[in-house]
Amino acid sequence: ASNQMWGGRFASGPAAIMEAINASISFDKKLYTQDIRGSIAHSEMLAQTGIISAEDQKKIAEGLNTILSEIEAGTFEFSARLEDIHMNIEARLADLIGPSAGRLHTARSRNDQVALDFRLWVKEELQRTANALVGLIEAFLDRAEEHAATVMPGFTHLQTAQPVTFGHHCMAYVEMFARDLSRVRDAIRRMDESPLGAAALAGTGFPIDRQMTAKALGFREPTRNSIDSVSDRDYALEFLSTAAICATHLSRLAEEIVIWSTPQFGFIRLSDQFSTGSSIMPQKKNPDAAELVRAKTGRVNGHLIGLLTVMKGLPLAYSKDMQEDKEAVFDAAETLDLMVAAMTGMVRDMTINTAAMKKAAGSGYSTATDLADWLVREAGLPFREAHHVTGRAVALAEEKKLPLERLALTDLQAIDSRINDSIFDVLSVNASVKSRSSFGGTAPQEVRRQTRYWRKRLKQG
Ligand code: ARG
């Protein structure tokens, strides 16, 4: 049999393989609440503007609410023959209320309908993501306050560079995830327009009120071009690109957690809740959750490239290609939600081994820059010369297998006679971090200032 929605000019139904490639119900059923909300708002507007009768509207709204409860109760029968969520719901509406159902689709097309439903869904997901990111940022702020003065090695090339504080390192992640949060909020602001009423692509001759439906559905305003309204998937691409950047940040964090939790580093211990054992090696405690966050980034990034590639050759306006937008976004959303939640748990629960961090912070001549800075400040050397003198001190320390602060003053003076006793004030890791009090630097007082700043910013929303 031909399709009951659009089968007027068709003599026969689709080949089985056509149905299989064409149907999207298996995944777009996720849009049922958005579809029903959109249809109710559309019907109310149609009644308000006199395009359909109040009686028809009442039947339509009641029928749609019945369908909502059927879907939620799990009794609704989805059919691949009816292609997608829009036609599944409309066909059921006709079963329930008869011919009045046919009036719902006046002045509307599935093209603006799906654009609306998907926008509503992506907007809600962006809001969920924003809330989750606030939770992650707060977890880092708590750890940063707790460890504002805990010294650890700072790295470049994964080699000990200069001492920093663990609080400062946490605040680096606060900055990253706060940028992700601001990208999410920008995306919401940009996509906050209703495409409903664009119809197939050209608008409609019916006297519809697009302001009214936009407002009823919580959008700032209606979109301004009917062709763009049904062609645009920027909001999905922006969600995916924002998600990909955020996932990339989560992956870098995951990598650090994997490194820090190795017995070789021993900087942190993951809680039992976020690690697993080995089935053969009893001594192991593996950072599986962190590794999976690192790995799932590949999926999220892949979905971004996938949808960019779907969209790149499409002429305006709608093409069925665009049906391929949904699985990418749904999977990226589910994956990202899980990643942020797992990371928030890990950050909150991990134990910080302050002794191991401090020990590592002092190894590898990490205060060599402090020695050079002292020579510049106290002895008036040009930095390049100070760098050279310090290099000789490091070579001597290496030869004597001593940390810099344990070198004898006479040995240091043999390298440069302008060195005096007060050099030892700057060679300890605590003195080193304390001295780096420039704006945004690692000094504990500066870290505390930055945590206060972000607490306040987060409250402002
Ligand atoms: N299932 C379709 C999609 O997801 C709905 C829009 C169909 N419109 C059309 N003209 N075939 O894109």
Image: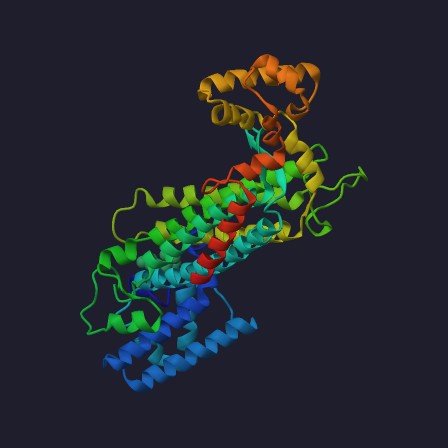
Report the side of 440 relative to 194 (left or right): right
Q: In this orientation, which residue lies closer to the viewer: 96 or 232?
A: 232
Q: Quadrant of the C terminus?
A: bottom left
Q: Could you tell me if residue 366 is visible in this image?
A: no
Report the side of 272 relative to 258 (left or right): right
Query: Which quadrant of the picture is home to ligand 1?
Result: bottom left
Q: Quadrant of the N terminus?
A: bottom left
Residue 56, image quadrant:
bottom left
Report the side of 262 relative to 111 (left or right): right
Q: In this orientation, which residue lies closer to the viewer: 142 or 97?
A: 142
Seen in the picture, residue 150 relative to 319 is either above or below; the reply is above
Seen in the picture, residue 161 relative to 332 is either above or below; the reply is above
Q: Could you tell me if residue 411 is visible in this image?
A: yes
Measuring 46% from the left and 52% from the top, which residue is drawn there?
327
Seen in the picture, residue 391 relative to 95 is either above or below; the reply is above
Measuring 65% from the left and 26% from the top, which residue is drawn there?
405
Seen in the picture, residue 36 relative to 147 is either above or below; the reply is below
Measuring 66% from the left and 28% from the top, which residue is drawn there?
363
Q: Return the x and y of residue 414 as percentages of the image width and height.
A: 61, 12
Report the side of 363 relative to 370 (left or right): right
Q: In this orientation, which residue lies closer to the viewer: 269 or 383?
A: 383
Measuring 29% from the left and 53% from the top, which residue is drawn there?
231
Q: In this orientation, which residue lies closer to the viewer: 216 or 378?
A: 378
Q: Return the x and y of residue 402 as percentages of the image width and height.
A: 69, 21
Q: Return the x and y of residue 257 as percentages of the image width and height.
A: 62, 41
